[in-house]
Amino acid sequence: MNPPPYKGPTSCTRCRSLKRKCSFASGSIICDYCLKRETECIVPTPSNPIKSCRRCYKHRKRCEPGDTACKRCTDLGVEDECVYFDQDPSDNDPLIMSPNTLAILDDLVSFDFPFITPPRVSSVLEKYMVALDDPMMFEVDTGKEGWELEDPDMLPTQEDWLLLYNHYTKNGEKEPIGMLFDIQQFLFDFYRKPAVLRLILCCKPTAYKLDDESGNRAYHRARKALFRSDLTPSVDLILTYWHIFEYAQFMGRSSIGQQFLKSAVELCLQLQLNKDPDTLPWLNHLTPRQKEERRRIFWGTFYFYSGQLAQDPDCFFLPISGEQVKAPSQINDPTPIFVPAELLKYTSETFNVLGTIKLNYTTPPSSIQSVIDLGTRLYSHFLQYRTTIPQKYILEFDTPHHISTADQDRFIAQISIVQEWLVEINMNLNAGVCISNRPTLFLSCLPSCHPMYLSKSNQIAIQSAINTCYESAWRIYSLRICFDSLAQQSHRYPPTDKRLYHAAASEFRLFEACIVFWFISCRMDPVWLVSCPLEDCNTVPVREELRTIFNKFGENTARVPLMVAVNAMTAEMQEVAETGVRKNVDGKDNGLEAIEIGLKSMSLGVEVESGLNENPILEPKALLGLLGMELGGNIRWKGRKEESWRLFWKLHN
């Protein structure tokens, strides 16, 4: 049986390459897809005669011709669809539209039919229609190294955007302005930002809800995004790293957060953020707003790094400074874009100076004379740096242990002008006086440093250390009490300034004041009080106030060791106040088992099986620690330098 006559083409080359159905109108030699796009329609013909029907050919089945249809189509009951190819083996050329045919089609397309107005489709919409009509795999550059659909958890959602918008605008009550980066521009570019940056920022509003479904899901989405993130150096990656650091600090996982902070500082050096953008020719294309954001991202990174250098005993050290970067300033576009932060530069630098002093006391000097000389030199350098800070940023009051109402009014006026960081920088300046002189102060408890055994110059050096540490400790304590009181007196300043009067982040500086009060009350040889008459700091109100402040900490924060130490110090101060007996450093074993105050290291989001000691006890955070001194005779501060200083006191006792 001869095959029926040829009924038309099968598919054109374009539809075949797109793996789409190629349909022809009745009597047309151009498929509907090519006709719609006005493209050339080429229908190739097979080189060998096809002896099977179209249906068997399509399904690659054996075709056994019958009387009216093949056996397979007959068995399936689709005899009407059994159509055979009719092809001349000598005709191997493809069917190509002639120029005349294309001209006729153009005339048909452009012909104005009466009473019919063809709808106009925009070019953008037409591109979307074509893209949606084509298969997705042919719209993707498959030349790249594979491709896959994005994880739904990584995709930006409207809920995430609203979460951050409400967080930064206080539910729409204020403008979304930031201190360390451009929040308005971030919200505008939210859907184009890296997933890990978007999701770690979504963790901040839910940080207090980790037990809730929303907070737990936000954390795990951010964790997944971090493992899949693109680590190409960029400013967004720096932002991501120090937001992870902030989150880890809040959750009490300091050792984890410090790794990301180190990566952020290294990226700052790699991208040259430690140089002002106005001095880099390749950044001339940036707008003033973008340059200011770049400066603030640097100062934010430098602030976090300097704070860790001053407080964390295991902080890394990298050669970075802000000498070549301008201080933060305001940009109006047309409204203010950033929170005023002119003091951020000086606050970061004071932390860096505190960290430098701390590094000098990592190991004790070789002799008592070396301690005095080192303390004198560090204190002189600190006073020299202090002269570089403008006077308008200094909170001055005449009596160290008391701040009058007039002083408070002056502070309120200063804060209304300067805004942020004023409390913190003054705490740092007074803490710098304490830590640079405290090792010299501690010499006053040694019998070998009795005034009768010292030269006149060394006596003056120790007396100066006693007086300066005592005065600075009182100033730290008075500032904390003053601002805790002002925070409750919101009628004295605008409601929008209430956040400026919280001194809750000053515990490490207040801990320095507490150490000085404890040492002068319980350890210092009373003979020095003859040449250094000091007002009594071992009073019931002082002890109770210190206990109240430090007992507010939770169980999973880095400040828990401070709370334990302060409770031990105030208990010993109370005992001395009641009995009048001081404990001296004699280097003898009192028979009591030593108790070390340490910080428990925790893993971020990892469950540890019971019975496994996965979380070691680390040295607690502090500006200088206890320098080998023991509280109550058997309570010690954990740390490598503590052992060295403890041995120093025994050798020079």
Image (cartoon, rainbow, N blue to C red):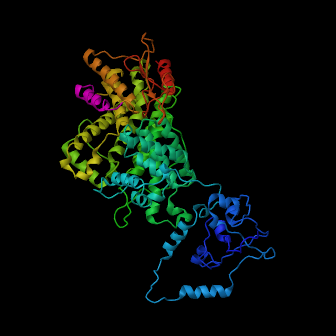
Q: Quadrant of residue 526?
A: top left
Q: Residue furthest top?
A: 591
User: Magenta includes 545?
Assistant: yes
Residue 171 on image: x %, y %: 30, 53
Q: Is residue 37 left or right of residue 248?
A: right
* Of residues 361 and 544, the one drawn nearer to the viewer in this rendering: 544
Q: Is residue 625 left or right of residue 20?
A: left
Residue 450 on image: x %, y %: 40, 20
| On screen, residue 590 above or below 358 | above
* Of residues 217 and 621, the one drawn nearer to the viewer in this rendering: 217
* Of residues 360 and 221, the one drawn nearer to the viewer in this rendering: 221
Residue occupying image coordinates x 32% and y 58%: 175
* Of residues 633 and 361, the one drawn nearer to the viewer in this rendering: 633
Q: Is residue 135 left or right of residue 96?
A: left
**One can see residue 551 in this view:** yes
Residue 638 on image: x %, y %: 46, 25
Which range of residues does the magenta coloring cover?
534-554
| On screen, residue 645 above or below 301 | above
Residue occupying image coordinates x 30% and y 56%: 172
Q: Which quadrant, please, contains the N terminus?
A: bottom right
Residue 352 on image: x %, y %: 46, 43
**One can see residue 143 in this view:** no
User: Magenta includes 246?
Assistant: no
| On screen, residue 295 above or below 400 | below
Q: Residue furthest right?
A: 90
